[in-house]
Amino acid sequence: MVTQRSCRLEVRTWCTQGTTSHTREKAKNFIKVWIASISSVCYCYSLIKFIKPGIFRLVFLLPIIYLFITLPLSISSFHLGAPTIFYLVWLGNFKLILLAFDRGPLSSQSPLSLLQFISVALLPIKTRSTAPSYLKPRRFQIFGFSALIAVKVVLFGVIVNLYRFTADLNAWFILTLNCFHVYLGVELVLAITAVPVRAILGLEIEPQFNEPYLATSLQDFWGRRWNLMVTSILRPAIYLPVRDLCKRVLGRTYSLAPAIMATFFVSGLMHEIIYYYVTRESPTWEVTSFFVLHGFAVCCEIALKKALNGRWRIHRAVSGPATLGFVAVTGSWLFFPQVIRNGVDQKAINEYGIMVRFVRDRLMMISPPTIKETT
């Protein structure tokens, strides 16, 4: 005898079987990648106790760097793969290269326990030491922090749902959606990543973003507000070495521009690599051009500020919108086209629905609706 409840469960299973099994396989690959990553970092933690900083230590870290490059290739999901690529291929490898020379967040200058070492090595977090003044929280920010995050989560959900009507929306409005989507998506993912580390290990973690929509210049946007985890890695890995090298040849005054350009160029290359992982298409160098353009613009901005020497300053009511407008327009020209052309944006939007259905089905299986069984 077949019950009403069993019939409903059977129909639901047949309708979602393909999506569920595919999602489960993606989750398994994701878990395997992170188990391998954690094991690799444990090896690094043991290694640095016996091998002194320098080229010799770098040689022993190279297999892990290669592993971090190859591991994300097995993840096909955008929402599982993109953060993993960013954490391992970019941040993780740069941290290991810095570690080889006893620099960066994993260096012996700030000793870490094994769990702390794993967290800092694999996740986009930086333990708080003496934070710059622009990162020190104000009182009203402490009280309003959770409410602000909640507003951003709601806004993110609204943006995702608006994508269903893109055929009827203005092109400039879609550009605005894309900009907010990237910002909110990245900030929320990084914030969620930091929550368990802060809760379990009790680490004081510096914020990953500093409200970039309040930026008043490109230097302010890229240096003090946008994705500060990248800034904290690129500064010791690229900016400072190039600046010190150029200082010997060009002098202190002219060493900043090459260092800034090198930093933005490397950032562009790393974004190009991330684009390759998510699209599996040959690079078009558009995103690299985006960052090179912004590096040049930052150099011009700094030179102009030095020339004016504080004699004249644009009001933030003008400089703020101008900064965000420049980022948005150049982004629509060089940053977004490669993603849109390869359908990555649509893939990401489709995955939201798959994830919602997957979670809903799991919850229904755990606590199914009460239905009277009839024979």
Image (cartoon, rainbow, N blue to C red):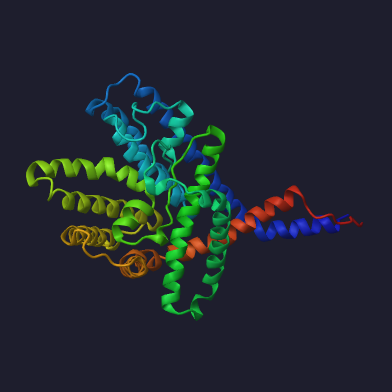
Task: Determine the residue positioned at 52% across, 41% down.
Answer: 31
Which of these two is toward me, 213 or 181? 213
Q: Is residue 25 above or below residue 43?
A: below
Quadrant of the frame with the C terminus: bottom right
Looking at the image, residue 72 sits to the left or right of residue 193; the answer is left
* Residue 253 visible, this angle: yes
Q: Is residue 158 above or below residue 35?
A: below
Which of these two is toward me, 132 or 254? 132
* Residue 77 visible, this angle: no
Find residue 16 and report its horizontal and vertical position in percent: 65, 58
Find residue 358 and report its horizontal and vertical position in percent: 63, 54
Quarter location, residue 236: top left
Task: Determine the residue positioned at 56% across, 34% down.
Answer: 200
Looking at the image, residue 348 sits to the left or right of residue 222; the answer is right
Task: Determine the residue positioned at 69% across, 58% down.
Answer: 14
Task: Determine the residue positioned at 19% across, 61% down.
Answer: 300
- Count numbered badges in the picture: 0
Q: Hey, which residue is sitting farthest top in the picture?
A: 50
Q: Hey, which residue is sitting farthest front in the picture?
A: 311
Find residue 10 and report its horizontal and vertical position in percent: 75, 57
Looking at the image, residue 205 sits to the left or right of residue 22; the answer is left
Q: Is residue 176 above or below residue 4?
A: below
Quadrant of the frame with the N terminus: bottom right
Find residue 120 and report its horizontal and vertical position in percent: 43, 36
Quarter location, residue 46: top left
Q: Hey, which residue is sitting farthest left in the picture?
A: 249
Which of these two is toward me, 234 or 24? 234
Quarter location, residue 112: top left
